[in-house]
Image (tube, helix red, strand yellow):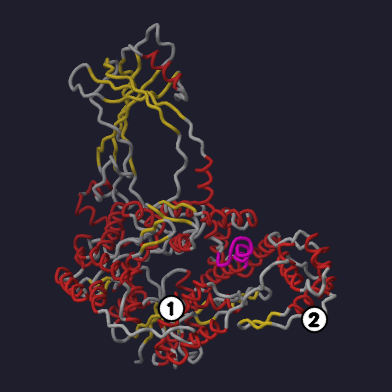
Amino acid sequence: MGKKLVIVESPAKAKTINKILGKEYLVSSSVGHVRDLPVKTLGVDINHGFEPKYVVAKGKKKVIDQLRRDARACDEIYLAPDPDREGEAIAWHILEVLKDGNAEKPFFRVQYNEITAGAVREAFKHPGTLNMDRVAAQQARRVLDRIVGYMVSPVLWRRIKRGLSAGRVQSVALRLTCEREKEIRAFVPEAFWVLGASVRKLVVPLEPFTVRLARIDGEKPDIKSEEQATAVMAELDGSSLKVSKVEQKTVEKRSPPPFITSTLQQAASGRFGLSPARTMVIAQKLYEGIDLGSGSVGLITYMRTDSFNVSRDAVAACRSLVVERFGKDYCPAAPNVFRSRKSAQEAHEAIRPTDVRRTPESISRHLDAQSLKLYTLIWQRFVASQMSAAKINQRTVSVQPAPSDRIRHDYIFRATASDVAFPGFMKVAGMNLKGDKEGEDEDQRLPALSEGEPLECVEWLSERKETRPPPRYSEASLVRALESNGVGRPSTYAQILSTLINRGYVTRERRTLTPTDLGMRVNDLLVESLDSLFDVKFTASMEDALDEVEEGRIEWTKMLDDFYAKFDSWMQATREPPADTATVEGTLDLLNKVREWAPPVKRGKRTFSDERFVESLRRQLDEGGRDVTGRQLEALLRIACRYAGQVPEIEDFMKAAGREDLLNQPPEAGPSDKTLRKFKCLAGIDLDESTAKFVDSLRSRADGGRALTGAQVGALDRIVLDHAAQIENFDELSAELGVAPPEPREEDAESGLLLGALESVRSWREPVTRGKRVFDDEKFYRSLSAHYKRKRFLSPRQKSALKRMVGRYKDQVPEFDKLAEICRTESRKKE
């Protein structure tokens, strides 16, 4: 029997599944998507059914080639990416690239919610086929997001600056954040007074307790001035007090549901300060498999879910554990069931441990600190979800002043105390009422009191307070707001927040998100220009439409047709207002008198010709198809000023048009020949991703005929020097390029030792945002390693930062003291 090929999207997942399935199977990884829409073009044929034009994703050619070789060597092919829209789309794209040459071989779709031996083997016993409705929903979302991002972002480029981006859901999240910020800035605090009394019994125990003024003549007190507060206090001063009522009741607090993606992100942020993105990275690792000593095993179920559904076997196992650990009273008579929201994928499960008997304590030595925290959180929440309700005894005491001639109003003071009668689900996490949001309002302890009992007033209390503005969003509360508004889905929340931060639209400090000035400007422009597109309710309705596509109720192209009809009309309203026709025609008439045009200028890949540009505008006016824009008129006026020597009337025309500022403009400088040669030298050189992006941005500027700034030329020179070893005949070229060859350096052994020591770090600190900068130890370490690998040395500043970093992680660095001594010795040698 030939081998069977299994394809998953993650190398770590492939490793775990390979151990489960054994030698009969070959398990390979696609490393995510293998195809996507092109980067530099729209890639969607809007006029022909929104047909996407997929290309091989960047860096995936070798992956695809390997998958094709694997497919040729096997008799059956199993597509086993994650069980959601994105996973279904990855499976479909893999099928599309493999079916040529393997048409006679069967392709199967395999899905599982947890990566355990039992679940995986059971899934392979019952393989299915691709869910093309789910593929269509993912494709619709991808096309939808591409259309919005590709067509709306240029609006920001024209009005604010190039390089900015708009996103269908990202911009709604930005809108919520900016609207909250505007509320905060517009908020005017109002003063109010809280009145009460410190009282005590006349017999032991004599410890005072506090009662608050709760009613005046049956209404809530509304005291908004010091004069009102003083008048009430004066009326009450000297009054004797007594207990008028004692109410006791027991309330039940139901156990919480198990986690779904959004609530896990919120809990991890509130409890541990983890960002949603970091939470998902850790959860992914727990899902894909951890080596517990006898091989890798998935510890939690799939972590991108919005369903509270739990398998019967998992519920039964959890209830059995509850009885064993806590007793029968802690296990309800029937399993707890939680209702998911309407759009939730009920075929999925909530996030839970794959084996509830795998307690956090039993596997703690196999997990790093953050993984253990998150697993413990998931385990405790799941166990709590199948436990009995907590019972809380609440006692409310009402206190009134004794009637007298001075008392003109009916005053009622109250105090409430809560005590846990039965902890129920709170037992599993060691929760208590005080200081834990799972419990409620324990302000103080109250002594035993009876109706009619007199009390002594120790002190009348009056406290001035002010109303507070709404708080800024945290990552957790923004996720909650997106979810409650039906915007986004479990797989998108973390990416939405990361994009806002990485784009510089918001900053994160101490878990609080604050829109930057740039973010406010971007939001204002989008709301002003495209309010309906980025309306919260409209975005939520698009999510519902995508759900309908997945459920097979509507065709994805019909959904996009309906969307695009609205979108196109909204975009028409953002068009730049046409330029003044009289000014355009007047300028063109004057340019008819030009006797000799400047020769065309070639800058990079583009050729610029004044004569051809002027002729193109004449044709545009004559044909009447589209208006001349303000940007075109600006370019036309600049060209006209260059010919004022041949056509003297141009100078008077410019003054009359209020544009005499253009008459003395310096000639535009294009990129130098040396700069263009440097780009040619770097073509085909293996650059890291960030460097390649930077070089591409400089090349685009040069191709547009614009000279590089001094700082940009310096940066380009440094990149050329860094890669001199890969440039043929660099020593001969360096003089022509104006770049001095790098001086030979002695290898920096000390930096190599320090970087090697950090290879043992398994638990990196959470990235910190300060102002517009993000400080990420792990990312910084990776960049230093790449730099050292290329140059074999670090600068003094880089090395100093590296030493500080090693010190921060000394607990994870083997033989740290020995390393420190070696570094001291190296430093003394250099001195």
Q: Is residue 195 above or below residue 298?
A: above
- Nearer-the-camera pick, 656 or 155: 656
Image quadrant in which the C terminus is located = bottom left
Viewed as shown, does residue 677 lie left or right of 83? right
The answer to whether residue 115 shows anywhere in this view is no
Per the image, is 156 magenta? yes
Picture residue at 29% right of the left edge, 37% below the top: 392
> What are the residue bounds of the magenta stretch?
151-164
Q: Which mark is residue 815?
A: none
Q: Is residue 66 above or below residue 115?
A: below
Per the image, is 570 magenta? no
Q: Residue 289 in the image: state x and y as whole percent.
A: 29, 71
Q: Residue 364 in the image: state x and y as whole percent.
A: 21, 63
- Nearer-the-camera pick, 234 or 62: 234
* Kind of residue at badge 2: Glu
Residue linked to disc 2: 596
The local crowd at label 1, few if under 14, some if 14 to 19, many if 20 or more residues have their Cα within 10 Å, is some
Q: Which element carries disc 2, helix, strand or loop?
A: loop
* Among the 4 quarters of the image, the one containing residue 20: bottom left
**Labels 1, 2: front one:** 2
Viewed as shown, does residue 76 lie left or right of 182? left
Main secondary-structure element of the magenta-colored stretch = helix
Q: Which element carries disc 1, helix, strand or loop?
A: helix
Measure how far apart labels 1 and 2 are at the Cα level.
43 Å
Q: Please say if the residues under marks 1 and 2 sit with CB atoms less than 8 Å apart.
A: no
Q: Which mark is residue 718?
A: 1
Query: Hey, which residue is sitting farthest top in the picture?
Result: 405
Image quadrant in which the N terminus is located = bottom left
Which label's residue is closer to the chain start, 1 or 2?
A: 2
Picture residue at 49% right of the left edge, 87% below the top: 681
* Kind of residue at badge 1: Arg
* Among the 4 quarters of the image, the one containing residue 541: bottom right
